[in-house]
Image (cartoon, rainbow, N blue to C red):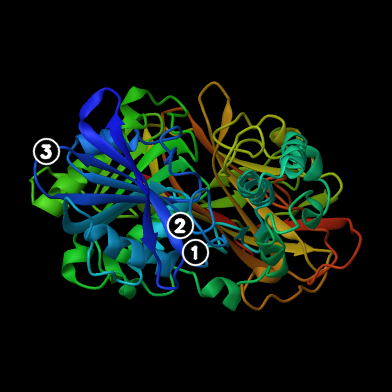
Amino acid sequence: MAARGTVPGLAEVRVERDVECRMRDGTVLRADVYRPVTGGDRPVLLHRSPYDKQIAQSDLAYPHPAWYAAHGYVVVAQDVRGRWRSDGDFYPFLHEADDGWDTVEWAARLPGCDGRVAMYGFSYAGATQLSAAAGRPPSLAAVCPALTASQFYEGWTYRGGALAQAFVSSWAAYLAIGEAVRRGDNDALEGLGAALLHAQEHYWADPAAFPHLDGGLADYYRDWLAHPTYDDYWRRWSIDTDYGRLEVPALHVGGLYDSFLSGTVRNFVGMRRGASGDHARERQKLLIAPFTHMPWWPVWDADAAAGANVVDDWQLRYLAEVLDGSESGVFDHPVTAWVLGHGWRDFGDWPPPEASATDLFLHSGGRANTAFGDGRLSEEAPAGEPPDFYTYHPAVPAPTAGGHSCCDDTLTPMGPACQAERERQRGVLVYTSAPFPADVDVVGDVTLTLHAVTSATDTDWTARLCLVDPEGCSRNLQEGVLRAAFRESASDPSPVRPGEDYEYRIDLGPVSARGPAGSRLRLQVSSSDFPQWARNPNTGWPPQPGIQVATQTVLHDEAHPSRLTVPLVRP
């Protein structure tokens, strides 16, 4: 029997706890339902999460569900299958399409509901929305997926063939803690707490050795490691294989330092161009705020104008327009992005039509190692130039400094950071542009085309785009990685031949920042960014036991025009 009660301080909202929802296979999921006391039938605002419905992500990003109920919605906060109060066994992503479909249609028939359901939530709760939407439940009227991916291989578990080690290991441990609590297993709970406390030490071991992720607590972690390529295990859950399956309006919320920013933007672009029906395609909105994955607070020099409350305001405006036809100007500009160093700016699409893709070629006299070397970026194409060399030793990787990871900044690299330590490493090549003569915005997607040679049969190539302010402080804007064996295919990797040059395309992802007059762009090239991504042992593909030291050569001459492609927008 569900428990009913009032919400303290909100006489206009009532809550019903542990309301049961039966899935098609008989499994019972439970939700807390918050209802406005007056006003007739209302739309449902549904949140499905593995992180405890009593929290409903309100301690990290959104207001409490009661706040949304006070604004006129029947709010349903549900524990997904196998988590907290819901029955069944939890396996990430496996049941979210069917369970999401069943829950949407159940919620539409709840007392006090008008038959229309919208969904909201970030991270995994964003994935539950898109997974459900791909099945086209008839009552789903809108989704608001925030800080989430377009698939769960590339950009979630792996990036360019490299394991997102710090995120994946620590996230699995957090999920396992929830299972240990469910079981009342205090020994496992203490062991997992100790593992997270010493996570930085555990990252140095084989990812498979991360402790206490077995015994049924998080067996799926072993499956993730057992599927290092984009195969059918991952393909079955991918949103971006066919955006034509989606026919629902969506407010996509991204964070400039979120681990899933590329996927968020890909979902917006994919649905704006390929969703089923004009109604859906014309009602896609992209909002990019200056957030890390969590909690949502402004980074860089952003202020309260870009705090978490902005997302709530946009969601209310968006839902009012999509569900009720209220004219709010939400769709006047399909893209609204925070430009670091400037503030909010509207654009007509992504990438912005006004952005000019500009090639900045790599140059040096053969000594681009560290920020004190002779590496340069310029629009002038290279001619006859010597290459740059460095040694990559897997036991001595270049350290991560800030980044796009998840979910706790004491465990994983998140946000902007001073790059001085990385840029002192001899194993990091540094190429810097001339100062901008006037303000310029860098808004859009960044790629690196790298011509390089390794002495190994496999290795990694990493890249970081940084902005160097007029005072000389270098801060990261975006990062990318590509495992050499994955240069042509994420599904069918192949080793490289030692000593042979190859062209590598490394996607760094979306950026949005102002380069003020006197500032410079900077590119770091290395073979490690640890522990953001797992180290490549250089022993071939598939990796063999042990490690190998590799000599790395970056070419930048007329026949090998290595270049950084950046989108420049004049203010």
Q: Secondary structure at mark 1?
A: loop
Answer left or right for 396 relative to 368: right
- Mark in front: 2 vs 1: 1
Q: CA distance from mark 3 to mark 2?
A: 40 Å
Image position of 262 with respect to 277: above or below: above
Q: Which mark is residue 38?
A: 3
- Taking the view exactly as shown, the residue that stands out farthest to the front is 1
Which tag, 3 or 2, sits closer to the chain's start? 3
Q: Is residue 354 visible?
A: no
Q: CA distance from mark 2 to mark 1?
A: 7 Å
Q: Nearer the viewer, residue 123 or 545?
A: 123
Q: Please tell me how many numbered marks the rendered image carries.
A: 3
Q: Nearer the viewer, residue 517 or 249?
A: 249
Please name the amino acid that badge 3 sits on. Answer: Thr
Say which quadrant the C terminus sits in.
Answer: top left
Q: Position of residue 79 (x, y in %)?
A: 45, 51
Which tag, 1 or 3, sits closer to the chain's start? 3
Q: Position of residue 235 (x, y in %)?
A: 53, 74
Which tag, 2 or 1, sits closer to the chain's start? 1
Please name the amino acid that badge 1 sits on. Answer: Gln
The residue at 79%/72% (across/down) is 542
Dot 2 and dot 1 residues touching (CB under 8 Å): yes
Residue beneath disc 1 = 151
- Mark in front: 1 vs 3: 3
The residue at 31%/53% (across/down) is 119
Answer left or right for 388 relative to 472: right
Q: Secondary structure at mark 2?
A: helix
Q: Is residue 57 visible?
A: yes
Residue beneath disc 2 = 263
Q: CA distance from mark 1 to mark 3?
A: 41 Å
- The quadrant where residue 198 appears: top right
